[in-house]
Amino acid sequence: MIAIAAAPALAQPAGKAPAKKGTGVTLNPALVADLSGTDVERAAKAAEDLGANVAPAAHEALLNALALGLPPAVAAPAMTALGQRPAPPDVAALRRYAGHHTPGVRIAALTTLAIYPDPAAHAAIIAGLRDPVGMVRTAAAGAAGKGRVKGAVEPLLVLLAKGEDSSARALAQLADPALARQLADQLGKVPETTLAIALGTILKRADFGPDEARVEIVRAIAKIQDKAAVNALQDYLDSSPKTPPRTSRTEAQMVIEARHGGGK
């Protein structure tokens, strides 16, 4: 049973402002009623307010409503709200909605699942990479990258071969030097533009290294003939510090100058 504050708020001590509706430690019962009401716009707003409420009962109200079933326009913000204060019981509800017939609901579920380290959450995200709808696959790829879902590498490589840019960015988020070398070996097997996005995104990661690994990526990008290769290297130069000197930056600059005719 959801514990809600049914009685009027008590008078606040002098000099202390009353808690704002939907953001205090108690729960306004009107929000729970609105969440399950027939006014979709009002219900969606109630979901947002419940997500901002730190009372445990607010989280429980969202879970209960999702379990009973919410229309797509309300389910999506309800899941986003749920993720503001993630708890292990959320995963089961989110997994159910990850298989919803409405793509927008699946997107919301997968995006929220990225927050949870639970293997069940990761399994749902991996399944989303095989969704028939492109926008859903994009959301699943984003979730795989954000959630560092290592088990998503193989299905992401499949999407990379199909030229889906979201898979390139996700793989870049997941890449360690070994995976970066595996990606470099995809030259000739995947679209060059997509491969350049993946390798270029890895280069821009501040946490990727050592510089010897970045040099390997620069050399792999240099083999890509598509103009996206030069763009990727230029983005790296623009986003990385000039000092201390890096061999990877020097080689990237040399490749760019060679592509532009020696810089003339």
Image (spheres, rainbow, N blue to C red):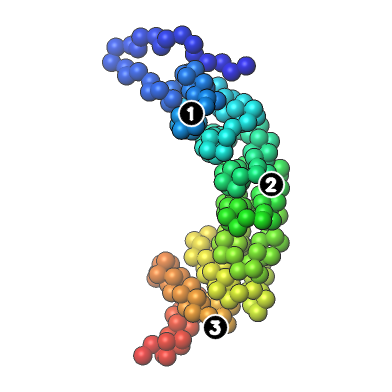
Q: Quickly name the residue at label 3.
A: 225
Q: Residues within 10 Å of mark 3 (few under 14, many from 20)?
A: few
Which image quadrant for residue 176?
Answer: bottom right
Could you say which is closer to the camera, residue 148 or residue 213?
A: 148
Q: Point out the image quarter for the N terminus.
A: top right
Could you say which is closer to the camera, residue 234 or residue 5?
A: 5
Could you say which is closer to the camera, residue 221 or residue 65?
A: 65
Asked whether residue 233 is in view, the answer is: no
Which is nearer the N-term, disc 1 or disc 3? Answer: 1
Q: Quickly name the residue at label 2.
A: 124
Amino acid type of the residue that numbered disc 1 sits on in the rendered structure? Asp
Residue 59: where, in percent of width, then height?
Answer: 56, 27
Q: Is residue 109 above or below residue 12?
A: below
Residue 50 shown left or right of residue 117 in the figure? left
Say which residue appears at 49% left-offset and 32% top-offset. Answer: 40
Q: Residues within 10 Å of mark 2 (few under 14, many from 20)?
A: many
Residue 175 shown left or right of residue 55 in the figure? right
Residue 141: where, in percent of width, then height?
Answer: 60, 56
Dot 1 and dot 3 residues touching (CB under 8 Å): no
Q: Quickly name the residue at label 1.
A: 39
